Image (cartoon, rainbow, N blue to C red):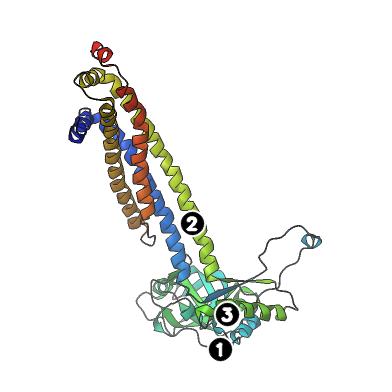
């Protein structure tokens, strides 16, 4: 049999039983579609998280209260101590370092905001004027928090766009008075809509001076300190300067953690990358199930077409030709299932992007290639046994069963 005859024989055999062919194609396509959709979700989540951190800038250091480290059990492990809080004085000291360009102390809390007879609960962020540049936000009206001493509790506020719309509607908000918790503040500006980062939308925030927020929530400590260096290649040196300064301010004990944006990005990238590989492996199990189905159906086909196989061998078809014909049929079914699954997978990923526009759920190229290759390889691999059984039939006995 020539290659053309083999392909024609396999095509006619596949189309002779449309329901059987459709079920095998569906089984294979479900596996491929599952791999495509799940890897699109996993990789989309990875890119979303990386993008959120990247929005903070490439020269960022984050100072957290408390020391994050691992170690064995020692006598000190049985003595509990509360690490000292980060303070506004710490933030002001960091601003004086030569490699530091901007510093934004942060304290956060939830409370109620009221204005014009309207009331709702909001997240309040106490910070400084550098927070606007560090987070890459834009002003819609008015001005941002003024540059002043971190200890000054000015009665000022900047509203996110959603908060402004809920409290004042289409009326101007700048210059109006609002009540945040038990504190009366004057609105000096409103943010442009659409600002997002780290899973938090700035549209839902009320921003106030850091000392104002500390008085509002009765605390002296800071949640975080964001530090921007003068240039990206200065990050390691700036980190060392920060740690030395904070150690000196804490009597030689470094009870804070300084992390770089690259470290955070690398951690999330590795975790979500492994998660993507994991869900892809789980979805690929369905391809093995589909391959077993192909094998079972092909074995039934060998039994049904025993006489046809005997006739072909009686007419001179070689064992290799019979084997190639059945392997070609299995390959055609796998290709049809893989392409159908590829289309269904992209349709599912499109549905995910439509439902969650912020999630860049595009299947990675490696996942698509692996899914298509695995589907084809599985179909052919599980088609070997039926093909060998068909090729091993004795022509006389095969014709006798007719």
Q: Measuring 37% from the left and 42% from the top, which residue is drawn there? A: 374
Q: What distance separates the C-alpha of mark 2 from that of mark 1?
A: 41 Å
Q: Quadrant of residue 318?
A: top left
The tag on residue 272 is 2
Vertical relation: 262 (above or below) 24: below
Q: Mark 2 vs mark 1: give the one in front.
A: 2
Counting from the top left corner in percent of width and height, residue 402 is at 23, 13
Q: Nearer the viewer, residue 25 or 328?
A: 328
The tag on residue 210 is 3
SS category of the residue bearing label 3? helix
Counting from the top left corner in percent of width and height, residue 389 is at 34, 23
Residue extending furthest toward the right: 75
Counting from the top left corner in percent of width and height, residue 77 is at 77, 60
Counting from the top left corner in percent of width and height, residue 313 is at 23, 21
Q: Which residue is mark 1?
A: 148
Q: What distance separates the C-alpha of mark 3 from that of mark 1?
A: 11 Å
Of pointers 3 and 1, the one earlier in the residue sequence: 1
Vertical relation: 30 (above or below) 162: above
Residue extending furthest toward the top: 400
Q: What distance separates the C-alpha of mark 2 from that of mark 3?
A: 34 Å
Q: Nearer the viewer, residue 362 or 214?
A: 362
Q: Nearer the viewer, residue 298 or 389?
A: 389
Q: Measuring 41% from the left and 58% from the top, which residue is drawn there? A: 44
Of pointers 2 and 3, the one earlier in the residue sequence: 3
């Amino acid at each position: 049999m020539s290659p053309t005859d083999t392909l024609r024989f396999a095509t006619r055999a596949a189309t002779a039983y449309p329901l059987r062919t459709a079920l095998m194609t569906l089984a294979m396509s479900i596996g491929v579609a599952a791999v495509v959709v799940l890897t699109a979700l996993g990789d989309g989540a990875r890119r979303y998280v990386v993008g959120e951190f990247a929005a903070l800038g490439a020269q960022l250091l984050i100072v957290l209260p408390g020391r994050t480290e691992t170690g064995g059990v020692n006598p000190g492990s049985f003595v509990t101590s509360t690490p000292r809080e980060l303070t506004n004085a710490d933030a002001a000291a960091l601003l004086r370092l030569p490699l530091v360009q901007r510093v934004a102390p942060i304290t956060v809390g939830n409370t109620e905001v009221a204005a014009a007879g309207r009331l709702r609960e909001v997240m309040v962020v106490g910070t400084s004027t550098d927070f606007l540049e560090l987070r890459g936000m834009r002003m819609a009206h008015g001005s941002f928090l003024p540059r002043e001493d971190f200890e000054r509790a000015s009665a000022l506020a900047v509203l996110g766009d959603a908060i402004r719309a809920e409290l004042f509607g289409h009326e101007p908000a700048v210059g109006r008075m609002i009540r945040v918790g038990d504190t009366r503040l004057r609105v000096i500006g409103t943010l442009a809509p659409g600002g997002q980062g780290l899973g938090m939308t700035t549209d839902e925030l009320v921003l106030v001076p850091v000392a104002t927020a500390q008085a509002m929530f009765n605390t002296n400590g800071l949640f975080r300190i964001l530090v921007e260096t003068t240039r990206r290649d200065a990050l390691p040196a700036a980190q060392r300067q920060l740690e030395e300064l904070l150690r000196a301010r804490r009597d030689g004990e470094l009870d804070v953690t300084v992390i770089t944006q690259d470290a955070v990005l690398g951690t999330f990238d590795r975790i979500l990358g492994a998660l993507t590989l994991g869900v892809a492996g789980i979805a690929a199990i369905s391809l093995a199930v589909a391959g077993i189905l192909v094998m079972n159906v092909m074995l039934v086909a060998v039994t049904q077409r025993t006489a046809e196989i005997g006739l072909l061998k009686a007419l001179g078809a070689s064992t290799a030709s019979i084997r190639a014909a059945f392997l070609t049929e299995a390959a055609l079914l796998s290709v049809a299932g893989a392409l159908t699954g590829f289309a269904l997978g992209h349709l599912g990923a499109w549905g995910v992007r439509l439902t969650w526009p912020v999630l860049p759920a595009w299947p990675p190229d490696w996942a698509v290639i692996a899914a298509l290759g695995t589907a084809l390889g599985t179909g052919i691999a599980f088609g070997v046994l039926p093909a060998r059984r068909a090729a091993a039939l004795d022509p006389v006995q095969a014709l006798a069963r007719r």
